[in-house]
Image (tube, coloured by chain):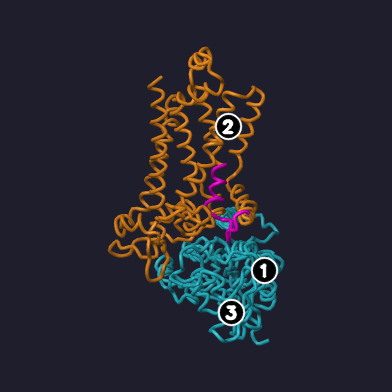
Chain colours: A cyan, B orange
Amino acid sequence: MSLIRAWSSYKLAEVCIIAATCLTLTGCGGSEKKTATPEKVVIATSGSDTMVNLAQMWAEEYQKVNPAVTVEVAGGGSGVGIRDLIQGVITIANTSREMESAEREQAKQKTGKEPVEFVVAYDALAIYANMKNPIDTITMDDLAGIYGENGPIEKWSQLGIDMKAIEANDEIVRISRQNSSGTYAYFREHVLNKKDFKMGSKDMSGSKDVVELVTKTAGAIGYSGMGYHTDHVKFVKVAAKKGEPGYEPSLDNVLSKKYPLARSLLMFTLGQPDTTTKAYIDWILSPAGQEIVKKSGYVPVANVKK
Amino acid sequence: MIVGLIYVCGVSAIIFVFSIFYFVWREGAPFLYDCFDFKSFFTSPEWYPTSVGNKRYGILALLAGTGSVTIVAMLIAVPFSLGTAIFIAEFCGKKTKEGLKIVIELLAAIPSVVWGFIGLMVMNPIIVKLTGAAIGLNALNAGIIVGLMSVPIIVSIAEDSIRAVPDGYIEAAEALGATRWQTVYKVILPAAKNGLLAAILLGVGRAVGETMAVLMATGHSINVPFSAEFPYFHALDSVRTLTATIAAELGEAPRLDAGPGGIFPPEGRHYQVLFVIGIVLFAITFFINITADLIVKGIRNKQ
């Protein structure tokens, strides 16, 4: 479902840009009239599926702060955002991963500008399990054993969890993401140590789809952004090593770096941003913008000192 | 002038097909030239196009996924559709016939994403409850969905071919004292055999090409649901089809240009190999349609 959303929003972004161009063109034509309405500026953004809700909330709130600026938000995935940025379709790319060196190289080649990075929020990659599942804590090694290629863990009983008590199948249903997602890449890098995933996972095309499927499937485990938590699904605490305590992906645990799977959510522009874009990013980093980060379930960067 | 315009419209389909094929070929060709290994491409189930150190491009699991969904779909669609077609053409009254035809056409009008949603929200819990499987998104689920989706196409073509059986055959059978069932079984079905086969083949083509519904209902999991021992075919395994793979991955696979010396960066191969899958799909559906076409032509020549 998010696939359609991604496509349609991608189309939407294109339409908006065309519309924006038309607007500026007609704006030029009618400039002698000196109409009172100020010219509308559009900031087009696209990228990370993890950030799409957050970016949408920022855009809506910013409309109230500065009505002259419209921010268009599209999803599609971190890779799409970076690609759109390089092609000049958008001004800001939202990503849940660092830009790869090949992508930086390509951006420089194509546009002659260096991509500039802004850390706008922190996210924890949460491990989700079904409400009925008695699991409480999982170690990073177990996660690698479940998800990694040649990993030996296939059954819940191997983790000492009795699924018979809740009348569910003993098989671990691994929910993963499609192989071009930023979340997939992050999980591969930090949990699997850059090794590959085991085949046979259910690969969803959206962060929300993962959480929904875990909510409905008793024997499922999945990973997704912490912002997608609902009351019908539970976080599994993650321990860095066996014997160490496990931590929930909470605000405090992410800020104190106790939670092992925390990451930065980023925005990229090509070269230093222009005044309008700069004002928008500054607003995001201001207490007002960071309040929205907190509201949408992620961890703010600005009041780190709190 | 008008004749010219009509001529252009007439050949436009040919132009479209060839330009689509050219486009798909052009995007996939660099992969075919540089790193295509026929054996591992078709015999390895390992699909890791974005791996960091060890990219592998095997589509066996995807072929098996498409195959398994198609098999289940046809097991469901063929008996239902042929039965419906026989009923509509031979057994029911005029009013029932009109009503049935409209309903079946309505079945064709349901968008595939709605079918996928039914698979995800309705069939998934039912399958879990009935079979005790860990998850209900699997070849069986998608097969049932796609089977229902291909019913209208099979029914309409099968019904046409049954109606094309000359009345003389049927009258002759009745004159010889054959019951209605004997007429259908011994006269109409053998006479309409080629048309029915073509209908089934077009249904298969529909099942192979379906994307959105299978993306949602199969579980989208790289897995070969066949085994060498009994029961040979595991319909309760999650699978992934060729079409769904393209749909899920193409959006984020970067299209990169060749660097100096005409060498493509390895990150760009994913995009290209997805187009090679497109070529494979093109070949499969082309083959199916041509076969169906030849069979239909076969009936015409005989008559």
Q: Residues within 10 Å of mark 1 (few under 14, many from 20)?
A: some
Front-most of residues A43 and B300: B300
Q: Chain of mark 3?
A: A
Q: Disc 2 to disc 3, how far (Cα)?
A: 56 Å
Name the mark nearer the viewer: 1 or 3. 1
Q: In the figure, residue B257 lies in which quadrant?
A: bottom left
What residue range appears in magenta?
Answer: B130-148
Residue A45: in sight, yes or no? Answer: yes
Q: Position of residue A107 (x, y in %)?
A: 43, 68
Q: Residues within 10 Å of mark 3 (few under 14, many from 20)?
A: many
Q: Chain of mark 1?
A: A
Q: Which residue is mark 1?
A: A132
Left or right: where does residue B281 sit relative to residue A187? left
Secondary structure, mark 3, is strand
Q: Which residue is mark 2?
A: B84
Q: Position of residue B12 (x, y in %)?
A: 43, 35
Q: Which residue is mark 3?
A: A238
- Hey, what amino acid is under mark 2? Thr
- Hey, what amino acid is under mark 1? Lys
- The vertical placement of B105 against A75, above or below, is above
Q: Position of residue A226 (x, y in %)?
A: 62, 72
Left or right: where does residue B303 sit relative to residue B69? left
Secondary structure, mark 2, is helix
Q: Residues within 10 Å of mark 2 (few under 14, many from 20)?
A: many
Front-most of residues A199 and A276: A199
Left or right: where does residue B160 sit relative to residue A208? left
The quadrant of the image that shows the N terminus of chain A is: bottom right
Q: Chain of mark 2?
A: B
Residue B137 shown in magenta: yes
Magenta part, dominant SS: helix
Residue A11: in sight, yes or no? Answer: no
